[in-house]
Structures are given as C-alpha cells and as structure tokens.
Image: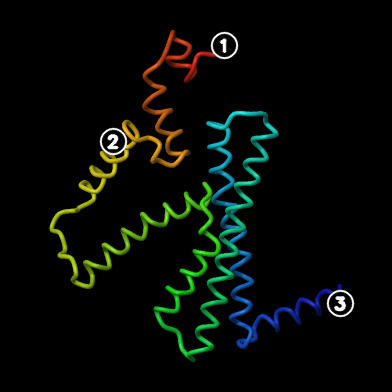
C-alpha cells in the first residue's frame, strides 16, 4: 500500500509538470474521446439496431459493439491528432493562432473521418448542421448579415422539413440509410394495415 501511494504521488507530480502539458492533454483527450464516444453511440446503436436491424440477437449485439467501438476510436484518434498537430504548430511558430486550429482539425478530419462509412457519415452530418448554425450567427455578429427582427427559426424548420420529405418521397436513395429507415417506419409503414393487430399493436402483420 505504501508503494502504491508513492506511485500515485509520483504520477500526480508528473501530471503537474507544465512542460508535459501538451502531451498529457493529448492522452486525456484520447481518454475522453473513448468515454464520450461510448456514451453517445452505445444507446443510439442499441435503439436503432433493436428497432430496425434484422438478424439474431448475437448479430445485433455485435453490430452495437462494432458501432460503439468505431465511434469511440474515431473520436479519440481525432482528439489526439488535433492536439498533437496544434502543439506542433505552436512549437514551430512560437505562438497559437486561429489558422492553427483550422489546419490541425482539417488534417484530423481527413485522416480519421474521411472514410465514407455510416458512423463517419452520421458524425459529419451532425457537425455540418451545427457548423452552419454557428457560421450564420458569426456572420450576424460580424455584420456580414443583417440581424433579423423576427426569429428565423420557423422559416428554417419549414425548409428543412419540406426538403427532407420531398427527398424521401421522390429521391429516397439520396438520404442516409438510418434516416431512410426512420422515414419508412413513419410515413410508408403507416399506410399499410390488414386488421387491428397491425393497425395498433404491431407495425407489420406477424406471419
């Protein structure tokens, strides 16, 4: 126990070293990426897999574990890549600038999230909506766009829902598979029933 306590004190002392802050931040960023990715993906994968994926329970559990692992791995690798590249640019130029953050994230995005799979697709599209909101707010703050007197959110909602249903009804192949599944359940499956069992109890009649 005394040796363990000494080891903990030594590690705590190491963690307080300012010269190691950049490297240690990358390590903790990796840890946080793993934890956050698991917290976000596991519940989502559980619900989506149980609702829409066909196959045995073992296949479904494997799909949930794979999705959670991929999300956690990608987030943690991106954080490490971003922090290392940010630190390298800071060391090279002796200071930190806004362009450093942009370039480091661009390289990390290309290396980690550039692979076109359904996990990366969901993450990138999630970020895109937030980026567009952020850029529009920044444009108003900087005076590039005029501030509106009325809340533009109703117009935003109108266009988003109008476009997504138009795409689903007439060009469904352009939508992401998970969104197609959700839309099919809500808008196509609700058009079909045979009796009370698949009208209220089940979505589709059991054979």
Q: Earlier in the sequence, mark 1 or mark 2?
A: 2
Q: Quadrant of residue 128?
A: bottom left
Compared with residue 18, is residue 124 higher up or lower down, i.e. above or below?
Answer: above
Q: CA distance from mark 3 to mark 2?
A: 67 Å
Residue under numbered circle 3: 3
> In this view of the protein, which residue sits in the foreground, 144 or 109?
109
- First in residue order: circle 3 vs circle 1: 3
Pointers 1 and 2 in contact (C-beta within 8 Å): no
Q: Secondary structure at mark 3?
A: helix
Secondary structure beneath label 1: loop
Horizontally, residue 172 falls left or right of residue 3, namely: left
- Cα distance between the residues tagged 3 and 1: 65 Å
In percent of width and height, residue 200 lies at 44, 16
Q: Is 164 positioned to the left or the right of 146 in the image? A: right
Label 2, on which residue?
166
Residue at 15%, 54% in the rendered image: 150
Residue 19 percent across, percent down from the top left: 62, 88
- Per the image, label 2 sits on a secondary structure element best described as helix
Q: Nearer the viewer, mark 3 or mark 2?
A: 2
Disc 1 to disc 2, C-alpha distance: 33 Å
Image point 35% across, 34% down: which residue? 168
* Residue 80, x across and y down, in percent: 59, 70
- The disc placed on residue 156 is none
Q: Which mark is residue 207?
A: 1
């Amino acid at each position: 126990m005394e040796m363990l306590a000494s080891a903990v004190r030594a590690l705590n002392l190491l963690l307080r070293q300012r010269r190691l802050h950049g490297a240690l931040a990358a390590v903790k960023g990796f840890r946080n990426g793993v934890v956050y990715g698991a917290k976000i993906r596991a519940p989502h994968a559980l619900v989506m897999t149980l609702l829409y994926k066909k196959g045995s329970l073992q296949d479904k559990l494997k799909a949930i574990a794979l999705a959670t692992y991929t999300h956690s791995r990608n987030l943690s690798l991106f954080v490490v890549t971003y922090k290392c590249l940010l630190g390298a640019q800071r060391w090279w130029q002796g200071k930190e600038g806004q362009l450093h953050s942009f370039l480091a994230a661009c390289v990390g995005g290309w290396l980690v999230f550039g692979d076109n799979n359904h996990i990366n697709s969901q993450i990138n599209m999630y970020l895109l909506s937030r980026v567009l909101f952020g850029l529009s707010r920044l444009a108003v703050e900087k005076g590039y766009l005029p501030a509106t007197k009325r809340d533009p959110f109703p117009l935003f909602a109108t266009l988003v829902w109008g476009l997504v249903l138009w795409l689903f009804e007439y060009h469904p192949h352009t939508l992401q598979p998970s969104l197609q599944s959700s839309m099919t359940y809500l808008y196509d499956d609700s058009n079909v029933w045979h009796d009370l069992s698949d009208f209220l109890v089940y979505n589709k009649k059991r054979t």
